[in-house]
Image (cartoon, helix red, strand yellow):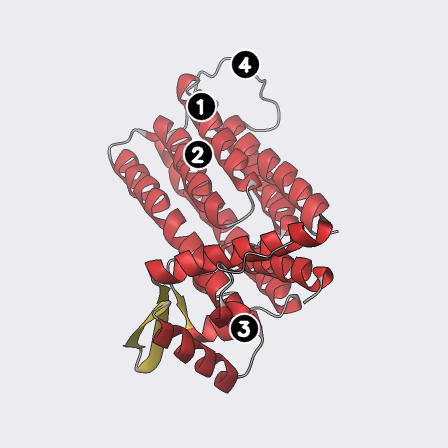
């Protein structure tokens, strides 16, 4: 066995250990698209709530009860289109790499995300039921951030930072009630776009 | 210069077996089909190498059914992990030796 073989072998072992334990098929560009959907959704919601002529300033009207169904509809529409886009682009990326999208690492990733996501989702429903609407935006940001941090051990390490920043934004949103929509636009929109560009730049070029 | 080969593991000299062990050391468990997909080997080749790793006591096998399809899970044993680490150390020593 010569030296080149040995170094080759060790390199192979390292890449296998990484490939077998991390799910790298999540597409960076899908992050950019998902962020854009969130921004569009936030803009639509904003116009619906405050119209075109509102000022960024003191809010004398918070979300009222009549607008809740429409807001929920926008949020779910953005969520479903985002999941669809993320799934489709991950599938394409996996196909290119000759892998399947449903493997032990993606299962581990979804399991890690499921607990914080389900907890946050149920908590949001409870808050909605109790008409504690002002806390929902921050709650969902915080729990989404937690699920990303949990997922980061099974995928790109950059996910951890996306998660931590979402948690910080969620906590800030709690401190500034009435401005939830800005924090949502920042957390689900701007951060996803920045994250997607970074991942695309680092791993997909 | 004498070469210490006490750590070198004949069982792991085989490339496929070494690759299987690297996956099982990095993950708690792995199933047959996922191993096959990652390693890009034939069923027969993978099965016979898994069998010999099992015989050495490096891995354990757990057979079950998921949706009526057979699902075989493999886990490393402590012995398997130790041997893998020793073998890596031996490879490292070999490289150092050739540089020195």
Give x and y (percent) for residue B62.
Answer: 29, 73
Q: Are marks 1 and 2 in contact (CB under 8 Å)?
A: yes
For label 3, the crowd category at 10 Å Cα-Cα, with few meaning under 14, some 14 to 19 and many 20 or more, is some
Image quarter (top left, top right, bottom left or bottom right) of the N terminus of chain A: bottom right
Q: Are marks 3 and 2 in contact (CB under 8 Å)?
A: no
Circle 4 sits in a helix, a strand or a loop, which is it?
loop
Q: Are marks 1 and 3 in contact (CB under 8 Å)?
A: no
Q: Which residue bears the numbered disc 3?
A: B16
| Res A191 seen here | yes
Give x and y (percent) for residue A137.
Answer: 42, 32
Give x and y (percent) for residue A127.
Answer: 28, 34
Residue B84 in the image: above or below residue A170? below
| Callout 3 and callout 2 share a chain | no
Left-right relation of A143 to A74: left
| Chain containing the residue with disc 4 | A
Residue A176 in the image: above or below residue B30? above
| Callout 4 and callout 2 share a chain | yes
For label 1, the crowd category at 10 Å Cα-Cα, with few meaning under 14, some 14 to 19 and many 20 or more, is many
Task: Work out how far the residue at label 3 is from the one at label 2, CA to CA, in angstroms.
Answer: 45 Å
**Front label number (1 vs 3):** 3
What residue is rendered at 34% in x and 82% in y?
B69
Sequence-first tag of 4 and 2: 4
Q: Which residue bears the numbered disc 4?
A: A57
Q: Which residue bears the numbered disc 1?
A: A173
**Front label number (1 vs 4):** 1
Q: Residue furthest top?
A: A58
């Amino acid at each position: 066995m010569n030296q080149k073989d040995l170094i080759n072998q060790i390199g192979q072992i390292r890449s296998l250990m990484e490939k077998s334990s991390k799910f790298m098929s999540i597409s960076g560009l899908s992050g950019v698209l998902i962020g854009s959907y969130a921004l569009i959704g936030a803009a639509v919601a904003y116009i619906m709530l405050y119209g075109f002529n509102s000022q960024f300033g003191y809010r004398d009207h918070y979300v009222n009860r009549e607008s809740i169904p429409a807001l929920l509809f926008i949020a779910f529409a953005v969520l479903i289109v985002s999941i669809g886009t993320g799934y489709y682009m991950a599938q394409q990326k996996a196909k290119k790499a000759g892998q399947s999208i449903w493997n032990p690492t993606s299962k581990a990733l979804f399991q890690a995300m499921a607990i914080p996501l389900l907890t946050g989702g149920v908590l949001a429903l409870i808050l909605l039921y109790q008409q504690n609407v002002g806390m929902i935006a921050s709650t969902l940001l915080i729990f989404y951030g937690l699920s990303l941090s949990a997922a980061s051990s099974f995928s790109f390490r950059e996910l951890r930072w996306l998660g931590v920043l979402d948690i910080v934004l969620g906590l800030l949103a709690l401190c500034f009630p009435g401005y939830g929509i800005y924090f949502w636009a920042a957390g689900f929109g701007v951060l996803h776009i920045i994250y997607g560009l970074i991942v695309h730049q680092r791993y997909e070029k | 210069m004498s070469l210490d080969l006490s750590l070198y593991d004949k069982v792991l000299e085989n490339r496929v077996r070494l690759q299987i062990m690297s996956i099982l050391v990095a993950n708690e468990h792995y199933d047959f089909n996922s191993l096959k997909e990652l390693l890009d080997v034939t069923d027969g080749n993978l099965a016979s190498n898994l069998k010999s790793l099992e015989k050495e006591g490096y891995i354990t096998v757990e057979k079950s059914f998921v949706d009526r399809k057979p699902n075989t899970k493999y886990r490393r044993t402590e012995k398997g992990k130790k041997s893998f680490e020793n073998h890596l150390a031996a490879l490292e020593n070999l490289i150092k030796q050739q540089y020195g």
